[in-house]
Image (tube, rainbow, N blue to C red):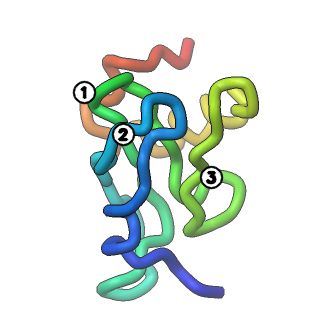
Amino acid sequence: MNKIDPEMLNILACPIDKHYPLESYFFTWVAADKVETGILFCSKCGRWYPIGNKVKTIPELYPDSLREREHEIEWFNNWRHLIPEKIKSWWVTE
């Protein structure tokens, strides 16, 4: 399975407000240059997008209407200890 190259994330923009580049935070790596899980954050609108939530290594840049909140809450809580405080403050999972 191919893993995502962090350099490729620089071309991604927020699907809501088109802001880029998104801030990237990586949690697990498969190799020194391949990300398996992490989170992307739009500093303009405060939305976050998981990497490796449903499909490992794939950033999930869904608009709000296509996001599965309950699944995202579970993912967010699993990685909470690695998610930066500024992202946690934008999104309440309770």
Alpha-carbon span between mark 1 and mark 3: 20 Å
Contact flag, marks 1 and 2 (Cβ < 8 Å): yes
Label 3, secondary structure: give it: loop
Please tell me whether residue 10 is drawn above or below residue 64 in the rendered image. Answer: below
Quarter of the image for residue 45 reads top left
28 or 14: nearer the eye? 14
Q: How far apart are marks 2 and 3 (CA)?
A: 15 Å
Residue corresponding to mark 3 = 53
Q: Which residue is drawn at 52% across and 30% down?
A: 16
Name the spot of residue 3 as percent of width and height, x first.
53, 80
Q: How far apart are the alpha carbons under marks 1 and 2?
A: 10 Å
Quick check: 29 left or right of 36?
A: left
Residue 7 horizontal/vertical position (percent): 32, 74
Say which quadrant the N terminus sits in: bottom right
Question: Label 1 neighbourhood size at 10 Å, few (<14), some (14-19), many (20+)?
Answer: few
Q: In what element is the residue under mark 2?
A: strand
Number of labels in the image equals 3
Residue 31 image label: none
Q: Quadrant of residue 41?
A: top left
Rendered residue at 53%/39% (across/down) = 15
Specify which label sits upstream in the sequence, 1 or 2. Answer: 2
Indicate the amino acid at tag 3: Asn
Asked which quadrant contains residue 65, the reply is top right
Instruction: Determine whether the residue tagged by mark 1 lies in a helix, strand or loop.
Output: helix
Q: What residue type is labelled 1?
A: Lys
Residue at mark 1: 86
Pointer 3: residues within 10 angstroms few (<14), some, or many (20+)? many
Query: What residue is rendered at 37% in x and 60% in y?
Result: 27
Reading the image, the residue beneath label 2 is 41
Give the mark nearest the N terminus, 1 or 3: 3
